[in-house]
């Protein structure tokens, strides 16, 4: 009969480590998206359906370009954090590490492409 303390049984079972950080990151990014998405919809609306030159002139103004850039940046960071938690919950082993690395690369690459597109329109 083995007598084990609670601490001894818990060793090796892992810890939360960054769970609180992920939670707060999701809360903050979702609150930011809650404010940014309506602004994005109302600033994107006037450019929708216009010609390329009209959209170019519209996004040359700083307010619509800044709102679009912030929305894309925060949206892709929120995506990265959410999909990382999803992968950590449902995928295990080496596939988990590979998928997390691929997802982080994908989200940062998409954010960079979106910001580059906004900068090209704005300048």
Image (cartoon, rainbow, N blue to C red):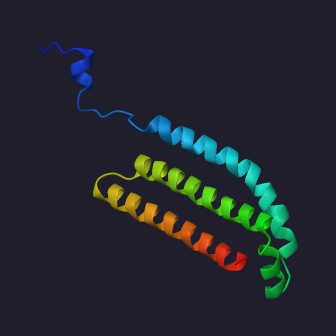
The answer to whether residue 99 is left or right of residue 81 is left
Viewer-side residue, 64 vs 123: 123
The answer to whether residue 21 is left or right of residue 60 is left
The answer to whether residue 30 is left or right of residue 90 is right
Viewer-side residue, 2 vs 14: 14
Q: Quadrant of residue 110?
A: bottom right
* In the rendered image, the vertical position of residue 97 relative to residue 54, given as above or below: above
Q: Quadrant of the C terminus?
A: bottom right
Residue 43 % position (x, y): 83, 65
Viewer-side residue, 31 vs 13: 31
Q: Residue at horizontal 46%, vertical 52%?
A: 84
Residue 54 % position (x, y): 84, 83
* In the rendered image, the vertical position of residue 78 relative to residue 45, given as above or below: above
Q: Residue at horizontal 66%, vertical 79%?
A: 120
Q: Quadrant of the N terminus?
A: top left
Residue 63 % position (x, y): 79, 63
Q: Residue at horizontal 85%, vertical 69%?
A: 45
Residue 60 % position (x, y): 77, 75
Q: Residue at horizontal 58%, vertical 60%?
A: 76
């Amino acid at each position: 009969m083995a007598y084990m303390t609670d601490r001894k049984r818990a060793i090796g079972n892992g810890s939360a480590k960054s769970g609180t950080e992920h939670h707060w990151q999701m809360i903050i990014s979702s609150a930011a998206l809650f404010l940014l998405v309506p602004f994005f919809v109302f600033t994107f609306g006037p450019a929708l359906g216009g010609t390329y030159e009209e959209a170019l002139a519209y996004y040359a103004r700083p307010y619509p370009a800044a709102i679009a850039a912030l929305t894309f940046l925060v949206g892709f960071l929120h995506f990265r954090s959410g999909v990382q938690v999803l992968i950590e919950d449902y995928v295990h082993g080496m596939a988990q590490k590979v998928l997390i690395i691929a997802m982080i690369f994908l989200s940062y690459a998409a954010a960079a492409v979106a910001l580059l597109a906004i900068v090209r329109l704005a300048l």
